[in-house]
Image: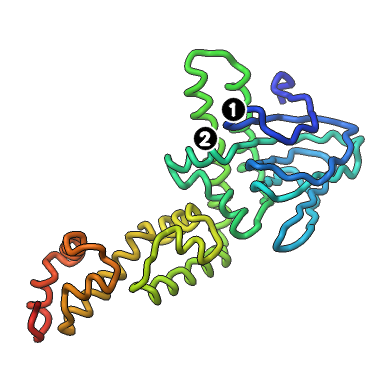
Amino acid sequence: MNNKLRSSFNTRQYMVNSDFEVYYYSDRNLGTLAPHSHDYYECYLFIEGDITMEIFSEKDGPTRHNMKPGDLMIMPPGTAHHALINDPEITYRRFVFWISKDCCNALTQESVDYMYLMQRAEAFHKYIYHLPPAEFHLVESRFLRLLEEISADRYGSDAARHICLCDLILTINRVIYDEEHKRSGSDELSLFQNILSYVESNLEEVLSLDDIAGKFFVSKYYVAHLFKDTLGISLHQYIIKKRLAECRAAIINGDSISKTFVRFGFRDYSSFFKAFRKEYGMSPKEYQNLYSHSPAE
């Protein structure tokens, strides 16, 4: 490891930079810090040492994890934690990456994919993952690339740092996502099925992304990512399709078209007409005339 990229450890637990900070630490004879939490997200990649990570979760209480080389920790804001130094004589090496909530929000405007693990940590209190050797070295290389770009003073450094930042975050999310989805995570499946059931039972009610996320106590970005990944469409598109299907069934049975589209949450006839025509290839009135023996409105 390039010692020029090594940072001197200090006990500071706040960010100086408004966007992100990244460090490579290699230390001996450190003492155990008191439990602490941040108002930003932390990503921690363990390389070597004799360390036990203690995390204080509101859901599970204090839990301890004996860290192994290749362990990756994602720590959301407000969750207390600290590393217990079991043997200070053994060199303790790790990468530490801090990113502010504002920076995360800005990245989310580019793509919700950047927030997958961070939202998973908040939704399911899943904080620590183990990277197989190939994936570990891939993530390690992204840390080093970002550190090298930060330490250099070259043309286009701001743009290059942003590219390296996005690459690091996306790589971390991708390697964990690919590994986790080999096993079809039951938590995500259960949440997804519960949301589907809720939507189908409440098509006549207000169904916004914010409302549904609040109902299930998860981030709206997490819900958005879950639907896009599972169905290939957004939650909004899914709700529109389900509402259109209910409208179609109702008008086939002879219900009033004007009352039906209002009943199932369409704000105006124009948006309902365009959505219905796009989905079924004809207007609501044409569809009712073709498939229903009841008079159309």
Task: Relative to 248, say whether 58 is above or below.
Answer: above
Q: Residue at x 58, y 43 (%)?
A: 172
The local crowd at label 2, few if under 14, some if 14 to 19, many if 20 or more residues have their Cα within 10 Å, is: some
Disc sitting over residue 146 in the figure: 1
Tally of numbered tags: 2
The local crowd at label 1, few if under 14, some if 14 to 19, many if 20 or more residues have their Cα within 10 Å, is: many
Give the amino acid type for the residue marked by disc 1 in the picture.
Leu
Q: Residue at x 77, y 44 (%)?
A: 36
Q: Position of residue 134 (x, y in %)?
A: 62, 42
Q: Which residue is mark 2?
A: 167
Q: How is the image coloured?
A: rainbow
Q: Residue at x 36, y 71 (%)?
A: 205
- Quarter holding the C terminus? bottom left
Q: Is residue 165 shown to the viewer in this render?
A: yes
Disc sitting over residue 229 in the figure: none
Res 32 quadrant in image: top right
Q: Position of residue 164 (x, y in %)?
A: 53, 29
Q: Position of residue 180 (x, y in %)?
A: 58, 56
Give the amino acid type for the residue marked by disc 2 in the picture.
Asp
Give the camera-side residue of 26 and 272. 272
Give the camera-side residue of 295 and 258. 258
- Quarter holding the N terminus? top right
Q: SS at mark 1?
A: helix
Whether the residues at callouts 1 and 2 have beta carbons within 8 Å, the answer is: yes
Q: Is residue 242 left or right of residue 93?
A: left
Q: Residue at x 48, y 52 (%)?
A: 221
Res 241 quadrant in image: bottom left
